Amino acid sequence: MLISLILPVYNESENIAHLWERLKETIAGMNEYRFEAVFVDDGSYDSTVEEIQKLQPTDALSWKLVRFSRNFGHQAAISAGMRHAEGEAHILLDADLQDPPEMIPVFLEKFREGYDVVYGIRQNRKEPWWLRFCFKTFYRLINAIADRPIPLDVGDFGLISKRVAGLISEMPENDRLIRGMRSWVGFKQLGIPYDRPARYAGTPSYNLRRLIELGLDGIFGFSKAPIRVALFTGMLVCAIGGIYLLQVLISFAMGGRTVQGWTSLITLGFMLGGANLIAIAIVGEYVCRIYFQTKNRPLYVVERIEESPSSKKAIDPAA
Ligand code: UDP
Ligand code: MG
């Protein structure tokens, strides 16, 4: 049975050779399977591509390299890998060895037992405390409001069957959060805990800005809760304004002083202005997503596809 390993790579030159060794060690003895590593080069500007081209395939492990025309992002790279993979199951893992290849046999055993989706649950993360805090908050927030829950502390690391990969590939959405789409698809799913080590080499390319972007995709791509929050905040602010007006009118009718409450007026002005801005921003989030989706641009552009030397061919998609 052929199994595809989906490996998005962006400036991972220092990790490729070591990753290849670890993959070979892991699959040694798993004779019932053949593996194809589908590398997706997400516009690396170091020697990642050359490092991949140097890799020696074995009978059990070959490689394919899908090269993007520029950097399109991690989620686009995974999507491309899934589209070009031919295995009965796809195993998604990062190339920096933060997703231990030793989990591959564990995932495959569960796949054999009939699970369509088997994913890793991160425990003992080695990232700095503030990043861990951000992740924790992010996953809990999404789960609290998402229409379909996304499992906690789960990344893209895991196995999906060919049919789940096909269903995800067919989803036309541009703002992709694979772990959310995978959860949405359904079928029999199982999470398995694993220790997430630090990167083998290199620096993570997910900086705070990209994490926030991914977080917002998670929230706005999977939930209508923000619109509800805006609605209820607006109603609350209106009610407070109404009660305040009533109080002023009553005090006027009873002959009280009316040029009063400068502070409360200003506060009210700020509150209303703030509430308006928040509401507009929330609508804007959705509108801009609709806007980009209606452009119908492809998720990525493939410049070239190469295969390990045994099959001796390079395909130029433009040809
Ligand atoms: N990656 C990618 N495109 C990007 C950023 C990252 O293909 O624009 C790849 C990267 O090479 C790695 C995986 O996605 O294999 C995860 O990236 P990283 O280790 O930076 O993220 P983290 O582990 O911090 O989530
Ligand atoms: Mg990483």
Image (tube, rainbow, N blue to C red):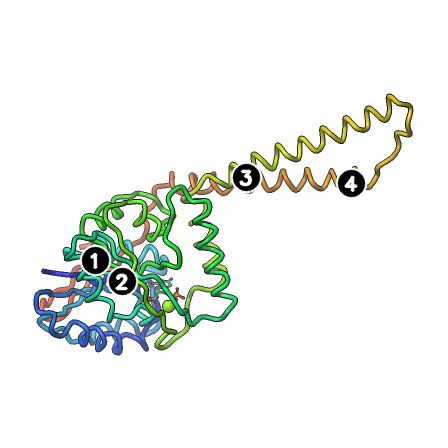
- Please report whichever mark, 4 or 1, sits nearer to the chain's N-terminal start: 1
Within 8 Å of ligand 1, the CB of disc 2?
A: yes
Cα–Cα gap, marks 4 and 1: 58 Å
Cα–Cα gap, marks 3 and 1: 38 Å
**Horizontal arrangement in the rendering, residue 102 relative to residue 28 (left or right):** right
SS assignment at label 4: helix
**In the image, which disc is placed on residue 261?**
none
Point out residue 77 in the picture as x, y percentages from the top left corner: 31, 58
**Horizontal arrangement in the rendering, residue 26 relative to residue 130 (left or right):** left
Q: Check disc 4 and report the residue beneath it.
A: 266
Point out residue 185 in the picture as x, y percentages from the top left corner: 28, 45
**In the image, which disc is placed on residue 90?**
1
SS assignment at label 2: strand
Is 245 drawn above or below residue 225 in the view shown?
Answer: above
**In the image, which disc is placed on residue 40?**
2
Name which residue lies at 47% across and 42% down: 288
Where on the image, by quarter, is ligand 1? bottom left
Within 8 Å of ligand 1, the CB of disc 4?
A: no
Name which residue lies at 16% across and 56% down: 113
- Please report whichever mark, 2 or 4, sits nearer to the chain's N-terminal start: 2
**Horizontal arrangement in the rendering, residue 134 relative to residue 261 (left or right):** left
SS assignment at label 3: helix
The residue furthest top is 253
Cα–Cα gap, marks 3 and 2: 39 Å
Q: Check disc 3 and report the residue beneath it.
A: 229
